Amino acid sequence: MIRISALAMALLATAPATAQAPATPAANPNLRTDVAKTLDQNFDKSDVNNDGFLSDEEVRRTAGQVGQQMMSRLDQEFDGLDKDKNGQLSKDEFRSVAAPRMAQMSASALQQLDKNKDGKVSPAEFNGPALAAFDRIDTNKDGTISPEERQKAPRR
């Protein structure tokens, strides 16, 4: 038996574990009970031998199926971008998608940074996330990140 990492749990939560239909997505992903139900359903589908644990083989099977699904989605997205169907993305084909996505990212960034929801980002709102991250790493609160603190900081 192996320990399931957070990544493996995320894979189990978002994809079907077997060739069967995936578990119905949580009705309300903000409700812990709905998320737990979906996780339980996906775990049960992964636990092929029904022993209540996921073996290395069962996890590998699940990860392989998730990988296949991801590759299929990437292929579909590429096919949608490749307007002239020549198997390559031209700069124009790439830009036709990049510009709207950049605009979407900008809008998302504004929403995340604009804490008081006034439609503008103040210097304090702009600096807040980076300074908060600095403060989390600076465990002794001396205003300096030592090599030891940097080494102990979680990788994100």
Image (cartoon, helix red, strand yellow):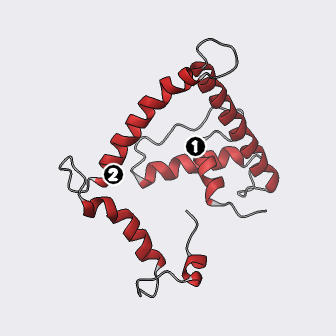
51 and 29: which is toward the camera = 29
101 and 38: which is toward the camera = 101
Which element is circle 2 on? helix
The amino acid type found where label 2 is placed reads Gln
Mark 2 is surrounded, within 10 Å at the Cα level, by few (under 14), some (14 to 19) or many (20 or more) other residues, namely: some
The amino acid type found where label 1 is placed reads Thr
145 and 39: which is toward the camera = 145
100 and 23: which is toward the camera = 100
User: Looking at the picture, does residue 22 appear above or below residue 153?
Assistant: above
Query: Viewed as shown, does residue 24 lie left or right of 131?
Result: right
Mark 1 is surrounded, within 10 Å at the Cα level, by few (under 14), some (14 to 19) or many (20 or more) other residues, namely: some
Observer-side mark, 2 or 1, equals 2
Q: Quadrant of the N terminus?
A: bottom right
Q: Name the outermost residue toward the right.
A: 57
How much space separates mark 2 and mark 1, taking CA atoms?
24 Å
Q: Residue at x 53, y 46 (%)?
A: 38
Q: Which mark is residue 112?
A: 2
User: Looking at the picture, does residue 94 appear above or below residue 152?
Assistant: above
Q: Position of residue 141 (x, y in %)?
A: 41, 86
Q: Residue at x 57, y 24 (%)?
A: 91
Q: Residue at x 58, y 47 (%)?
A: 13
Q: Name the outermost residue toward the top.
A: 84
Q: Position of residue 43 (x, y in %)?
A: 64, 50
First in sequence: mark 2 or mark 1? 1
Q: Name the outermost residue toward the left.
A: 118
Q: Which mark is residue 30?
A: none
The residue that mark 1 highlights is: 14
